[in-house]
Structures are given as structure tokens and as C-alpha cells.
Image (spheres, helix red, strand yellow):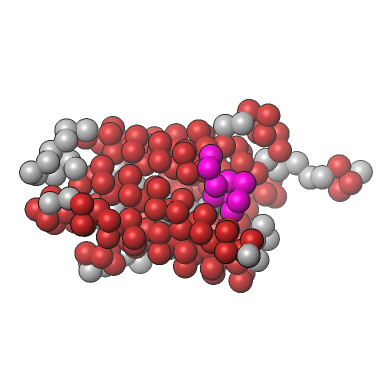
């Protein structure tokens, strides 16, 4: 029963993030044209993630991201069986969020924004190599923030888990939203891609975030995290 609660928390938390982010992007398109721009989109993602982490961290650990789950899997902080279930429910939450946005907003805005699928600008300088490197770095920073604020006991007294993680997503989007769409999250990419049936370069948004999360998890777990006192002795 508790496992189901964890999985439900992961689905709802991922819905929080993806609904807010997709809706903010779609709302910038005509005929709505909310005018919030990249700053508003970054804040929508960051604030939604902060709230979701604050709500669900005590239930599921608040991954809301297959890359984060694989990162924790690489350091033994989640079992393979539970990791697979987490990822499935994260993808379900993201897909439901994309479906909700497709039903709520005008079709013209939905089509113009392509449901906020994270992608490089068309006919831009962004090669596949740049896309992979950027998403790797953005997710590396995100996973580092997760470890530093939510895993490392030295960060616990600050009680900044949700706030710090949400801000990292926000500044990543501000820094690279116009480069790759700043996904950092295969579920965030998958939901709108599945609903819109558009999977161009989709593999990049799995490979790079997972590599970045695993790299950051390994660095923090084995180079930055303090060993338990029994091991130190």
C-alpha cells in the first residue's frame, strides 16, 4: 500500500511540474499571448516544482523526473524495481498534464506552442552535440542541487529542498530555455511529445539528462557527501 502512495505522489508531483510548465508556454502563443515570456515560463516551472517537492518529499522523495530516479538508482538509493515503477508513473503524470493543457487551451495556441515540447529553435546553431552537452550540464546542476538540499544531511538545517531545487530549474530555463528548451527531465519531454505525436530528437532528451543526473549523483555521493561516522572511524 505504501508503494502505491509513493507512485501516486510521483504521478501527481510530475503533473504539478508539467502542467504549470506546459500551460505557461502554451499561454504565450496566440490567441492568448499572456506576455509572460521566458521569465514567466521559468517561474512557472520553478514554483510548481518547489511546491510539489515541499508536498511530496516525505512520501516518495519527490523525484518527478526519470533522470533523477536513474541518478538515485546509480548510487543505490532506490531499488531497480521501484525505479521502473517511478518512471512509469512519472510518464503518466506528464502525459496527463499535456492532455489537460490540450483540452483547456485553444487549439491554435496548443499547435503553435507544440504543447511546449522542449526543442532547439528551428534552423538554429544548436547541433545535436550542443543539445546533448547543454541538457547534460543543466541536469548535472539540477541533480547537484537535489543532493545538496535534500540528501546531504548538512543541508537539512537550511530546509531549502523545494526552494533550492525549484530555483535551479528556473535559472536553468533562463540560461538555456532558448537553446534546447531546458527540459532536464525525460518525462517533461515525453508527455507533450506523446500527445502531440512529435518525437524529433526525443532520444537526446533522455540520454543527456540521465547522463547528467548520474554524473552528478556519483560525484556528490562519493566525493562530496560525508561518510557516516562509523565509516570515518
Q: Is residue 194 above or below residue 50?
A: below
Q: Which residues are magenta?
A: 54-62
Near-viewer residue (5 or 88): 5
Q: Is-magenta flag for residue 61?
A: yes
Q: Is-magenta flag for residue 187?
A: no
Q: Position of residue 28 (x, y in %)?
A: 17, 41
Q: Is residue 56 above or below residue 214?
A: above
Tell me if 38 is positioned left or right of 171 in this view.
left
Residue that sits furthest to the top in the current view: 158
Near-viewer residue (161 or 203): 161
Residue under the image location 52 percent in, 54 percent down: 9
Tell me if 81 is positioned left or right of 231 in this view.
left
Residue under the image location 16 percent in, 33 percent down: 35
- Can you see residue 170? yes
Quarter-of-image position of residue 173: top left
Residue under the image location 75 percent in, 41 percent down: 226
- Picture mark count: 0
Predominant SS along the magenta part: helix
Residue under the image location 32 percent in, 45 percent down: 21
- Can you see residue 127? no
Tell me if 217 is positioned left or right of 123 in this view.
right
Q: Position of residue 134 (x, y in %)?
A: 37, 49
Residue that sits furthest to the right in the current view: 233
Quarter-of-image position of residue 49: top left
- Image quadrant containing the N terminus: bottom right
- Image quadrant containing the C terminus: top right
Residue that sits furthest to the bottom in the current view: 81
Q: Position of residue 53 (x, y in %)?
A: 52, 43
Quarter-of-image position of residue 24: top left
Amino acid at each position: 500500500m505504501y508503494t502505491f502512495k509513493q507512485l501516486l505522489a510521483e504521478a501527481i508531483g510530475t503533473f504539478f511540474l508539467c502542467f504549470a510548465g506546459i500551460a505557461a508556454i502554451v499561454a504565450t502563443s496566440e490567441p492568448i499571448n499572456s506576455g509572460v515570456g521566458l521569465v514567466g515560463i521559468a517561474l512557472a516551472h520553478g514554483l510548481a516544482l518547489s511546491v510539489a517537492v515541499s508536498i511530496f518529499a516525505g512520501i516518495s522523495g519527490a523525484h518527478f523526473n526519470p533522470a533523477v530516479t536513474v541518478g538515485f538508482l546509480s548510487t543505490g538509493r532506490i531499488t531497480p524495481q521501484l525505479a521502473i515503477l517511478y518512471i512509469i508513473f512519472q510518464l503518466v503524470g506528464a502525459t496527463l498534464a499535456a492532455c489537460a493543457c490540450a483540452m483547456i487551451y485553444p487549439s491554435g495556441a496548443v499547435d503553435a506552442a507544440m504543447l511546449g515540447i522542449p526543442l532547439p529553435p528551428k534552423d538554429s546553431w544548436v547541433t545535436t552535440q550542443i543539445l546533448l552537452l547543454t541538457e547534460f550540464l543543466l541536469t548535472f546542476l539540477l541533480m547537484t542541487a537535489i543532493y545538496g538540499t535534500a540528501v546531504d544531511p548538512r543541508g537539512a538545517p537550511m530546509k531549502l529542498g523545494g526552494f533550492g531545487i525549484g530555483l535551479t530549474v528556473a535559472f536553468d530555463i533562463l540560461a538555456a530555455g532558448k537553446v534546447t528548451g531546458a527540459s532536464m527531465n525525460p518525462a517533461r519531454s515525453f508527455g507533450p511529445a506523446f500527445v502531440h505525436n512529435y518525437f524529433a530528437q526525443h532520444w537526446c532528451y533522455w540520454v543527456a539528462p540521465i547522463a547528467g543526473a548520474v554524473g552528478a549523483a556519483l560525484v556528490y555521493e562519493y566525493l562530496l557527501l560525508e561518510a557516516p561516522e562509523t565509516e570515518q572511524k
